């Protein structure tokens, strides 16, 4: 079956406008799931890596997608845990 080439809609700068659903891949869904599990604080990084199939920790951490606000929240939570030890 031959598909006719359709010209994509573009913005004022000539960039193609692509619907968000066309940008989602299985890897996007995988990263989102891993990030949400990580943020739940119910499992250790090692447990999540085992389930997700990540071998090197760097690859795992590259797949965790955190916003600046989430990083700040995580940093604050970690600092509170350290203070609870004393």
Image (cartoon, helix red, strand yellow):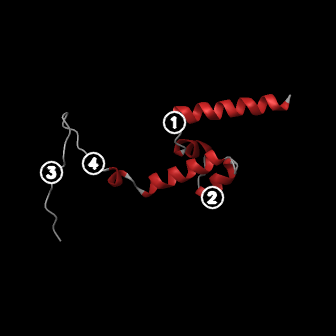
Q: Mark 2 highlights which residue?
A: 51
- Lower sequence index among marks 2 and 1: 2
- In three-dimensional space, the C-alpha distance between marks 4 and 3, rounded to whole angstroms, equals 11 Å
- In three-dimensional space, the C-alpha distance between marks 1 and 4, rounded to whole angstroms, equals 23 Å
Label 4 Cα neighbours within 10 Å, binned few <14 / some 14-19 / many ≥20: few
Quarter of the image for the C terminus: give it: top right
Q: Position of residue 82 (x, y in %)?
A: 78, 30
- Lower sequence index among marks 4 and 2: 4
- In three-dimensional space, the C-alpha distance between marks 4 and 2, rounded to whole angstroms, equals 32 Å
Question: Mark 4 and mark 1 in contact (Cβ < 8 Å)?
Answer: no
- Lower sequence index among marks 2 and 3: 3
Residue 5 falls left or right of residue 16: left
> Which numbered marker is on residue 18?
4
Quadrant in which residue 77 is drawn = top right
Label 3 Cα neighbours within 10 Å, binned few <14 / some 14-19 / many ≥20: few
Which residue is at the front of the view, 11 or 43?
11
Residue 85 falls left or right of residue 40: right
Q: Position of residue 66 (x, y in %)?
A: 53, 39
Q: Secondary structure at mark 4?
A: loop
- In three-dimensional space, the C-alpha distance between marks 2 and 3, rounded to whole angstroms, equals 41 Å
Quadrant in which residue 39 is drawn = top right
- Lower sequence index among marks 1 and 4: 4
- In three-dimensional space, the C-alpha distance between marks 1 and 3, rounded to whole angstroms, equals 33 Å
Q: Mark 3 highlights which residue?
A: 7
């Amino acid at each position: 079956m031959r598909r006719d080439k359709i010209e994509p809609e573009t913005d004022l700068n000539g960039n193609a406008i692509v619907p968000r659903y066309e940008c989602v891949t299985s890897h996007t869904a995988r990263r989102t799931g891993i990030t949400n599990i990580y943020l739940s604080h119910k499992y250790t990084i090692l447990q999540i890596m085992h389930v997700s199939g990540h071998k090197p920790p760097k690859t795992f951490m590259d797949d965790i997608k955190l916003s600046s606000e989430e990083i700040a929240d995580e940093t604050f939570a970690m600092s509170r845990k350290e203070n609870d030890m004393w």
